[in-house]
Structure formats: structure tokens, C-alpha cells
Image (cartoon, grey):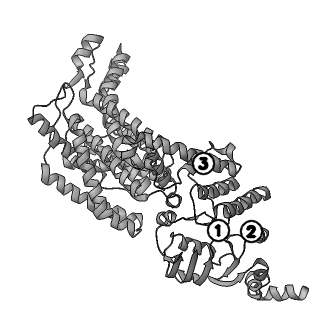
Amino acid sequence: MISVQNLHKKFGAFHAVDGATLEIATGSITGLIGPNGAGKTTLFNVIAGRLPASCGKVLMAGEDITGLPPHELFHKGLLRTFQIAHEFGSMTVRENLMMVPENQAGETLWNTWFGRGRVAEEERRIRDKADEVLEFLTITHLADEKASNISGGQKKLLELGRTMMVDAKIVFLDEVGAGVNRTLLNTIGDAIVRLNKERGYTFCVIEHDMDFIARLCDPVICMAEGKVLAQGTVDEVKNDERVIEAYLGTGLKNKVKSNA
Amino acid sequence: MDILNAIVAFTNFVFIPATAYGAQLALGALGATLVYGILRFSNFAQGDTMAFGTMATIYGTWGLQAMGVSFGPLPTALLALPFGILVTVGLLLATDFSVYRFYRKQKVAPTILVIVSLGVMFVMNGITRIMIGVEEQNFTDGERFVFTAREFKEWSGLNEGMALKTTQAVTIVTAVLVVAWLFWFLQKTRTGKSMRAFSDNEDLALLSGINPNHVVRVTWILVAILATIAGVLYGLDKSFKPFTYFQLLLPIFAAAVVGGLGNPLGAIAGGFVVAYSEVFVTYAWKKVIGYLVPADMAPDGLVQLMSTDYKLAVSFIILIIVLLFMPTGLFKGKSG
């Protein structure tokens, strides 16, 4: 689905992504792990068109999508969520979801005046869809709450809900579980699995919670210092020497070993 | 009776003119605040957009007058307004296509866009002056007053007269209608919601599939509508002179900043704050005070805090105070 080839991203002298090469297979839930500062989010930002790449390529189903603006990637079915949940604070939760499907007739001035019927009909359809999504995420009771008032975890659900408003092909989830309690995390996990199975979404998930990763993801990719260290099943990656070293540092790794 | 006379004098010389002026500033500031909220730069060309729109409307008015069309007691310019708006929409969309789009694609810093808009301002400035000249133009016609000072005196039996000019009434009514329409548009229509979404969080708006090109286009169209209406109302109420419109830039930005840049509600409040302050400090209070205090205490001087020549200084001072002590304005804007 997504093929990242020798991708670099520099901020001045700092090499945030340093020649990352990886594949995300169609239909998979790929986990992306790595210590803080490994370049995971930067990688997402480059893939999702928020930051330009310094060099390297991103292919989606064989097509070069490097540097395309976010709304065009959205059009191709590539969606993402943010590490710190984003929302349109001045709108209700339902309105937040209703913003999503692209190319709505109501977006042009012409239709606002002369296509009233069409716009209203479309809005009804999108509203029904939004209500469905809210029910799926078990947050129907928040539908008319202002999005700036809901909790951090609920915002994460809203982020996930946004990706469900359209038929996405691949969704990049940036720490969807951060700051979310266990129960809510399970809801999110269930939603991801269901979307993967029932609707064929491909996911790429950045996450620090290893239980969450172990439950959902296969394969898992580990990044450190802007490079891809290891790739494989959860257990393979977890036991990889280089991965342990990246997380714990060389000294600590030896200490852990000697203790064991 | 003297208190009544004082109130009438106050209403006639301060309240009515300041309200009309405030409404004009509010409409101008709304245009500036929309550009700031959505395109994220201070549009220095706002005053000259108003001048251009007014000029187009004046030509429309002359055309209508030549054809013998009139709007009864109301100014003919109101009939020519749609024409003026259309021409201004064309100009702004052409400017965006040929100038701003290039910089947007480069994702330049807002300061660069401000300087670009300064360039656009000079060009618009030139276009307007080449087309209509630098002199003052009066294009008000129709009935001059809703009621005159003499009619009011006869009706009320007071010493002090109060007049309501047609242009003042037209200004206030039009401003209320336009603002109500704008808020309905931003709150209720899907187009308005995508503009608010874009202003709230641009990243998320793009990742939600909102087409930025639509949003930008609609913004310029709204700015053209607001600027032309604001300019024409100001021109009807006072007179049209390109240089005066260029100078309006300062009170308009003072208004937008006082209210909170990027916040439409703030722009309206700011417009009135600036207008009232300006009229309050430049009005000679001698007459009003004379009615209120015993005769022997009546002031000899004009009791004018500042000469009208310095009225622009008022906006400047407001701007500085707000930026120093309350940079996000009364209604929490995006500046600061």
C-alpha cells in the first residue's frame, strides 16, 4: 500500500528522519514503535504531506505521492490523526464529523444560494452517517457538545471517528492511545480491528503501549534516530538486540542482561 | 428641559454620527478580520479595496443616473452596489490568482504576505486614482434627510434640533442587515462552516478534506462584498476621496485589533469602540455642558479634547494601548 524509500527529513542540521525505508502492506495493521525522538511523527508528517521531504520518495500503490498537499492525499484515501488531538473547538462533535467528507456540494457559494435542496439532502445523509459513527464509538451522548469541552480521550475517539466518515484506504494513527484510559483504549482497539476486518482499512499505528501494539499489530516496525531498526512480528522486534539497545542504551542493556 | 436639550444635542452631534461611522468601520474591519482569520495576514490593501469598490459603484451610479434611473428618496448608489461588488470581486479574485496564490504555494511567512499586500495596496491605489482622479466626489442623491433639525424642533418644542440624514439611516440599516446575513452565513451554511473550520485549525481542515481553494475564493468574495458596502456607505455619508480611504486603514485595523483579529464579533465591537472614541475626543462639548451646568458655570472654551485634525491619532493610541495590554483584543482573537 505504502512504500517509503530512503526518506530523509532535516531540520537545519538535525536529521529527524535519516534514510527510512519501509513498507506498509495492504490490509495490515502495522505498528510503528521507537523511543521518543526516533522520528516517527516526523515520518507521519512527511508521508501525510504536512512537511516536505528533504529527499526520498513515498509511493502509494506504486504511485509517487511525495510532497502532495494533505487535501489531495485525503482525496486518495490517505488519512491521519494527530498525537495531540486536533478539533474544531467552536463546533459541536457532530459538526466536527460532518466537516469531513470532501467535495460537499454545500462548499461552494453557488450551491449555498441556488442548490439549497441538494445541500440539505446531502447534509441529512452526512448527519446520519455522523450519528452512525458516534454510535459505533459509543459517544452518541456527546453529539451536541462543543468539541473544545470534551476530554482528551474523547477527542482521540473523535479523531478516529473522522477517519470513519469516508472510505479511507490507509489511516495513520499517531499515538491514538496516549492519555486514554484502559476502557476507552479497548474501545479504540476494537474499532480499529473492526474497521480493518469489515471495511478493509489499512492502519499504521504509532504507539508506546506495548500491550496495545501486541494485541493489534502485525508486523511491527521499530525506528530509532531516524532509521528503521527492525521489522517483524511483535515478539521478533521485542527481542531484537538493536531494539533493546535503542530503548535502554548499551549500558542499561548489559545491566538488564546481567540481572537476568 | 435642559437635560433634554443636552441629550438631544449629544444624540445629534455625537451619538448618531459616531454610530454611522462605527457601522462603516465595523464592516471594513470585518473584511480585514476575515482575511486575517483565514488567510492569516493583515491585509493592508483593505482601505484601497474599499476605495476601488466605491469607485466602481460611483461609475455604476453615474451610468444609472445618465439613464434616468433613480431610487426614489434613497441614494441611487444602492442600486449600483451589486455592480460595484461584482467588479471588486473580479479584481480581488484576479489579484489572488496572480499574486497571493504564488506566495501561498511557497507557504511563506505571514509577514511576507503583509508586505505583498502593501504592494497590492499601492497598485489598487494607482488604479483607483487613474480611473476616477484624486479629487473629492459627491455621489449622494435622493432625499437628504429623514427628518431635519427644524422639523424636530417644531415637533418637540426644544431649543436644540436633531437631524437624521438619509445616509446615516441607510448606513445603520444596511450594516445591520449585512452583519446579520454574514453571521447567518458563517454559522449555518456549510460554506461558512468550512471557513470557520479553516480558521480554527488549518491543518485539521486540510486533513478533513476541506478544499482550501474554495475557502480562499469564498473569503475574497466576502471581503469584496464587505469592503464595497463599507466604502459606499462611508462615501455616501461623507464623500469619496481616494486618500481618505487609504487613511481609513488605520481606524479599521485599530477596530479589528481591539476586538481581536480573526474574530468577526470583535471586529464589530471594535468598529464602534474606535468610532465612539474618535468622536468623543474630537467633539467640542461646550454646548452639551452648557445645558447641564448652571449658567455661570458654563465653559468659555470649546471643551474639545483634541482637534479633529488629529482624529487618526486616536486610532493609533487605541492600537498601541490594546497591543501593549491586551494583545488578543476584547474577544480573544488570534493576534498577540
Mark 1 belongs to chain: A
Discs 3 and 2 lie in a common subunit = yes
- Drawn side of residue B24 relative to residue A118, left or right: left
Discs 1 and 3 lie in a common subunit = yes
Quick one: quadrant of the N terminus of chain B?
top left
Q: Earlier in the sequence, mark 1 or mark 2?
A: 1
- Drawn side of residue A89 relative to residue B198, left or right: right
Q: Residue at x 33, y 67 (%)?
A: B102
Relative vertical location of residue A172 with respect to residue B311 in this rendering, above or below: below
Q: Earlier in the sequence, mark 1 or mark 3?
A: 3
Is residue B280 visible in the rendered image? The answer is no
The residue that mark 2 highlights is: A216
Q: Position of residue B269 (x, y in %)?
A: 43, 39
Quarter of the rendering containing residue B158: top left
Q: CA distance from mark 1 to mark 2?
A: 10 Å
Amino acid type at image mark 3: Ala
Asked if the residue at tag 2 contacts the one at tag 3, i.e. Cβ–Cβ closer than 8 Å, the answer is no
Mark 2 belongs to chain: A
Q: Residue furthest right?
A: A260
Q: Position of residue B124 (x, y in %)?
A: 22, 56
The residue that mark 3 highlights is: A130
Q: Position of residue B276 (x, y in %)?
A: 37, 36
Asked if the residue at tag 2 contacts the one at tag 1, i.e. Cβ–Cβ closer than 8 Å, the answer is yes
Q: Position of residue B319 (x, y in %)?
A: 40, 50
Q: Residue at x 69, y 80 (%)?
A: A222
Discs 1 and 2 lie in a common subunit = yes
Secondary structure, mark 3, is: helix
Relative vertical location of residue B253 with respect to residue B15 in this rendering, above or below: below
The residue that mark 1 highlights is: A203
Q: CA distance from mark 1 to mark 3?
A: 21 Å
- Drawn side of residue A136 relative to residue A16, left or right: right
Secondary structure, mark 1, is: strand
